[in-house]
Image (cartoon, grey):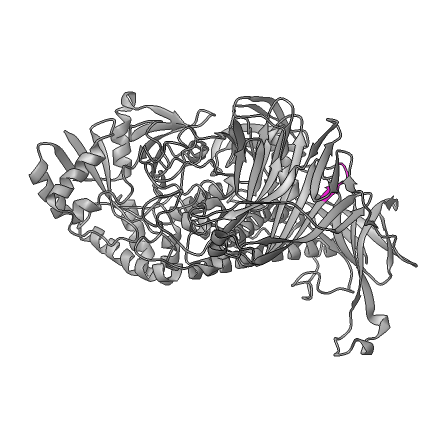
Amino acid sequence: MKKIHVVAHTHWDREWYFSDNEAFIQFSYHMDEVIYALEKNELDYYYLDGQLSIIDDYLKVYPEKETKIKELVEANKLFIGPWYTQMDEFVVAGESVVKNLQIGIDMSKRLGGHTSLGYLPDSFGQGKDMPKIYNGFGITDAVFWRGMPNEVTKSREFYWAAEDGSKVLTINIRNGYYAGVALVEGELYQKKAMLELVSEDSATEIVTLPVGGDQRAVDRDLKAIIQDVNEQFGTEYKIEESNYPHIFNLLREKTNELPTVQGEFMSGSVSKIHRSIYSSRYDLKKLNDTIENRLIFQLEPLMLMADDLGIPFKRELLDYIWKLLLKNHAHDSIGGCNTDKTNEMILARYKEADQLSYSTIDYLVRKISESIQGIKENDLILFNTLPYTRTDPYVVEVSTKHEKIRLFDEMNNEVDSQILSTEKVYAGEVRRSESDYDEAKYYYIHKVSFRKETRPLGYTIVTVKEQTGSNSSVIALNVEDKHIENELYKISFSKGKFSILVKNQGKTYENCLYMEESGDEGDTYDYSPAYHDKVYQLNFDTTDITVQTGAFLSTMTLNGQWSLPKDLHARKVGEINVQIDYTFTLSLSKDSKRIDMNVKLNNQAMDHRMRLVVKTPVKTQVSYADTLFGIVERNNQDPHIHDWKKLGWKEEPTEIYPMIHYSTIHDDTSSWSIMSKGIKEYQVIDSSLYITLFRGVGFLGRPELLRRPGDASGNQYRYIPTPDSQLLGNLEMALSLIITDDFDPAMIQKEYQIYSVTSPYYQVQTLNRFTNPIQYFQSNKVDQLNSLKEFIDLNNSKLVFSVLELSRDGQWVNIRLYNPSLTEAVTNEKITLATESTVRFVDLNGDLLESLGKLKEVSLGSFKPGEIKTVSIQR
């Protein structure tokens, strides 16, 4: 006899084809009904979708309800957490996932505690690192729906393992989190069919049946329904109200009957997975990347440095900014598969988080700089917020009264520099006519590049000295042979095509960069080729080329136009009727491993996709991309790409994959990696990397796509236009290419971190009061700055640095590291501290795992493939 465990729940999308404000009104009444149903014993248990953000919003308006919620949680009737929001697993950073759980669990403490369950019922696929993240929070159970193919396991209950040995006992919900609605609403025969279906693939007699759905009201007659169904089918099934902790306790008694699986799950074989949602609303994903990197690699380390110096760490401010960002990490929100109205609200949260985060950095660098003892006019303070010694060239703007400048270090030795540009600016009151301006009130803004070694988590000072005369500018070339080079590469451009010489290999790669443009008759969920498509290979056929060379930075800039079809109709009839202006800039910095690329487009075409193509010599059947805490290997061709329709899959298994920060292909001779700031999608065709810059579409969902037959996603009953998702207008993309002999994922991640954030800096001067929006405000100095403690230097580590964070009690600094390799352990890693300190290992939530005592040299032990460790150092 099958024992059917009914879990009453709701799946609460914060926003989707409705806004979060509209959903909140529904929730404010829904939560009252949940409380009433549990208090009146209409329901024994209720699971509130595993996320705290909806309760956070509710309690801001109804704070008097907190006591009642806490009582129900402590009575094991209402189950909450552990997440702050129901997040995506493929396009946000690993530390965002950790922060999501940290904030959710911390909030749940005052509400009676969280449910220790990795619950993600509607995420568009399952990331391979989730078991180790869950274990890092003491979570050993998980529930999900989408992405699991039958060919991996047909059992709905299994152990899901990661390469480091972490594992969680998992329930893969059959037919979705709404499967049990038929129990409530169906006719008797439909109830029977549903019970048979959900029981089919259960490995034991224990069957999980979630009864709930999107924004679904409380099923107040559930007890009577269960009683009636038991009377009808009592010889085959025993149905009872249940909860997830109880179900997993029962399953643990059957562990010898359960299989173990490993890896990521993004198959569209049994449910829609939306394998190209990673490129929807690129503009929003770019903002997310910018803010994420700033919070992780700039803001929190800078706040820690400031706290050491005597400027208090503002935990509440940091959490507030993170909450804004995490609300945008809900799977529909970060996916971009929303109405324009909803995406406007998502954009507003990004703008708020953006302004709060960069303004905090601006405030702190100014406060610290102006408070340094002996600081003087025209001193330039350079900050390093990473745990590596920075030697990459700075690019800064400084303001001076005179046109010519030179830079000097603390020992008054001149610092070699390269003036990139100089602009004459007026400092007086603006007038209608510039002829009324006082010549004495002009000053100069110089963009300058130079190299100055800056210690990890520290700052250094360079002095700007004004000179008479004019600066020697960069050399601008407009000659027939156009090229730029540094110590590693030489990039040449001729007749619309690029070639790259990799100097240490002695090999030149011809025509290795170009664009591809094609139609997109999909929607905000999925790319799909146009029914009448034409694909264009776009070279850079332009004569408007500027080459600038210098000691620290050389650039090549191309300006041109591409002629394309304006829309699907023009594409169908073969009409070329729109121009897209572009600027493509390649940059090489001194000694850099990176070829930095910047693409600016004025997009005037609709329903199309544009990709950068990197043509490589690599011969391989697999690609690699970074994941939350590691890397993943993926097939360049899906084994079911030709028979998926015959098999009845929900969508085509196109080899379009997500990347968080980079993707790579390599073989025995070379490795090619593309990093990006906000671009999240790639595909490998033959030996080329296709990087989706953006795609524009005009509907939330469309039916009968070539890649996704059947009903429209999102809302199957009506077309919902999303003109903003066409991304018309100016767009900008930043990418970087690294070509090496071997694939070194730890090196690539380190390069990405340096690439992803600039070093904060501050010039002591009064000429330009608008270097940032809050520069105009008066600021008091700190009476006496403490000395800045030396901390660690991870320059030579074979591990990936993930975060530097202050413990929630403010007593410890936590450093998270991981081994990105899929197969190789890292041994004998050590951290050398500046002074002897009390050290311990903690889990991802900061809870004690092992005390190591007082140490100066900390042995980290062996890191298994994919393993994460957090070292905690007492302040």
Is residue 589 rendered magenta in the image? yes
Q: Start and end of the magenta stretch?
A: 587-591
Q: Residue 804 sits in which quadrant?
A: top right
Extreme residue toward the front, this view = 573
Identify the main secondary structure in magenta: strand
Identify the residue at image location x=21%, y=33%: 199
Quarter of the figure that contains the N terminus:
top left
Is residue 702 rendered magenta in the image? no
Identify the residue at image location x=50%, y=60%: 348
Q: Pick whichever, 273 or 236, lies toward us.
A: 273
Visible residue check, residue 856: no
Quarter of the figure that contains the C terminus:
top right
As drawn, 634 above or below 527: above
Instruction: Please give left or right for residue 415 compared with residue 855 in the image.
Output: right
Extreme residue toward the right, this view = 468
Q: Where is residue 133 in the image (x, y as percent from the top left)?
A: 45, 35
